[in-house]
Image: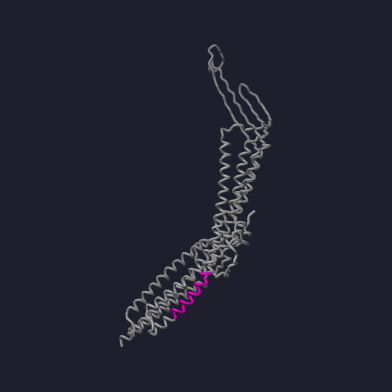
Amino acid sequence: MSLCLMKMHRLITLALLVCASASAVQLTDHKESKNRVITLEEAYDMTLASDQTIRIAFYEIRKANLLPWSALTRLGPQLIGNASYTGNHSSSHNDALVETSATPGFIKTAIDTQFSGFTYTQPIFDPTVFPAYRYGKLSAKAARLQYQFTVRETLFGVAQAYYNVLKQQKLVDVNQQTVDLASEQLITAQARFDAGAVARIDVLRARSTVEGARNTLIQSQGTLDTARDTLSNILNLGGKTNFTLAEPPVESDPGTPFEASLKNAYDCREDYKVSAIGVDQKVALRGEVIADYGPKVVAQATTQWSRTSGDNEGRNHNQAAAISVQMPFLTGGQREIDLITANQNISQSRLNLEKTAKSIESEVKVAWVSVQTGREALKALTAEVEAATQNYTDLQAQYQAGASTSLDAQTALRDLNNSRTLLTNQIYNYQIALRDLQRAEAAFQQPRVEKSKVQ
């Protein structure tokens, strides 16, 4: 009688463990339902409003917009004021001189000079202004393109982090289901062992499977916490992870040929355009070096006041105006060195443009292949999960009826868990791959990128 009670107690304990696990999941879902729900579109908008990287790129635009004005200041007027004071007090001794003074034989001299004036300079012609202005305009254009590129890359990072959280949540659910199924197997094995139908090894093997599944569940929960914290930081939520993510609409493969995708990338990629502008910038800098060989015309007007007090008291007011032509004939070879350096910089920029083109081609190719392989892998894994599910159901029923071994049932459970894990990963990886191809083509979130343009 006591043996039967012990067996019943074991079965009830195992059943309570399974129910507790299920209740914990339901409680977690209930708590999460009270949290804020964030959609992927909202995540994009939150990032655009608060991301530091985007703000830094915005300030780069503002700084670059000042460069053309900086070039024009070379033709701007300059007014310089100056003032000085000089005091000269001296004395000399003369034995032949007789004076009615406190110190006979001494001659004292005191001269104080006060000087002030203004110098007005107006550059009339400076050949370096034009290439410098062109360089500034190109820099401003490049900064705007770089800003758009930063916006697109940042939004893609949001999508990656968002889908990673969804994937990890689904993996936690898959691992929880595996724990539940393994617990059911343990109950079955314990019941058959208590009935004397199987050896104790079946119970031990089932318990080992339960603990292994629980360990996988714990690790996946930790990975989920890390993924949620990463998304929280990207969205500038201050480390708060009390949010729930909504499943975005499923993207479909547009079936764009690789050649068309690559052409779109070369036509639209901001980083490729920035690299091309870099060549023009180096040409403009070389033009500035060449322009430095030319003459500069400067007009200058000066007005000065001086006052002398003491033994030679007097006042002076001088005015002068001049137009000068400055022609540098010899600068010690520095201009020649600058010109050689400028030519080398142009060659280097052209190589960087070719390197960027190669990098874009590689990015588009990898993204395009990932979409193609991901689509077919998704079909294969879906079929694999269906087969693994049916196989597990059949073997578990056979084990309960004594027609198969516990090893068969445990193997079927592991196969089912592996196939579900692979399918879950592939579902979300495929969605990321589709968006990665859009990013490589510079088509990802194009409306938001266009809206974020800064003039």
- 59 vs 216, nearest the viewer: 216
The answer to whether residue 11 is visible is yes
Horizontal side of residue 418 vs 267, given as left or right: left
Farthest residue, direction bottom: 1
Residue at position x 36%, y 74% from top?
208
Please tell me in which quadrant of the rendered image residue 400 appears. bottom left
- 246 vs 254, nearest the viewer: 254
Q: Is residue 388 magenta?
A: yes
Farthest residue, direction left: 2
Residue at position x 68%, y 29% from top?
320
Please tell me in which quadrant of the rendered image residue 181 appears. bottom left
Q: Position of residue 220 (x, y in %)?
A: 44, 68
Horizontal side of residue 102 vs 453, given as left or right: left
- Counting the numbered discs, the total is 0
Which region of the structure is painted magenta? 376-393
Image vertical order of residue 153 relative to residue 32, above or below: above
Horizontal side of residue 406 vs 33, given as left or right: left
The secondary structure making up most of the magenta span is helix
Image vertical order of residue 403 relative to residue 211, above or below: below
